[in-house]
Amino acid sequence: MAHFAKINEQNKVLTVLYANDRDVQNEDGVETESVGQAYLEQHNNWPAHLWIQTSYNTSKNQHLKGGTPLRGNYAGTGMTWDSENQIFWHEKPYASWVKNIPTASWKSPIGDAPALTSEQQSEVDAGTHFWKYNWNEDNQTWDLTNSII
């Protein structure tokens, strides 16, 4: 079963459909995106070039079953297709964040959140505290918060 994202001219994902294997295979029995696109155009009245194949098993440019990742992330409604980088992007979480192409994910302009100290992590593990870093867009910092459980 092959999955395809239906996108509009602005590269927004409108929906994701699947096609049976026989509907995406060429005459040699090999799954081919262009065959699937032609099939979907014919049966869904939407231009072939606006159907982009996506992999249910791909997230953050990793294949969840050890295979070859396809297009960064499995497409979902509201995501954006980036044809230049061949990646489906989730909504940008903050205005300042930038694309991290190798991981097909968004990254803060100062990098990842700091790690918790071993003491903080042991409190989280024990279930007595909930330490967490949250992005502060106004200050462009990772702010540490704590909730006592």
Image (tube, rainbow, N blue to C red):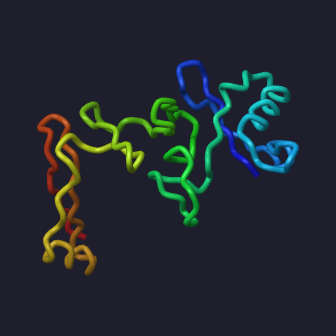
Rendered position, 147 above or below 106: below
- In the image, what residue occupies the spot 80% across and 22% down? 45
Seen from the viewer's position, the closer of residues 134 and 70 is: 70
Query: Residue 68: x percent and y percent?
Result: 56, 57
Q: Quadrant of the C terminus?
A: bottom left
Report which quarter residue 147 is drawn in: bottom left
Q: Is residue 11 left or right of residue 93?
A: right
Q: Nearer the viewer, residue 27 or 13?
A: 27
Left or right placement of residue 7 versus residue 87 in this view: right
Residue 57: quarter of image = bottom right
Q: Nearer the viewer, residue 115 or 102?
A: 102
| Percent position of residue 13, x then y | 58, 31
Q: Along the horizontal axis of the image, is 41 left or right of 12?
A: right
Farthest top residue in view: 9
Examine the rendered structure and indicate whether residue 88 appears above or below residue 22. Answer: above
Farthest residue to the front: give it. 28
Q: Residue at x 54, y 53 (%)?
A: 69
Q: Residue at x 15, y 34 (%)?
A: 138
Question: How far across and down, in percent of the image, does residue 105 sit?
Answer: 38, 46
Point out residue 56 in the picture as x, y percentages from the top left corner: 62, 52
1 up-or-down from 148: above or below: above
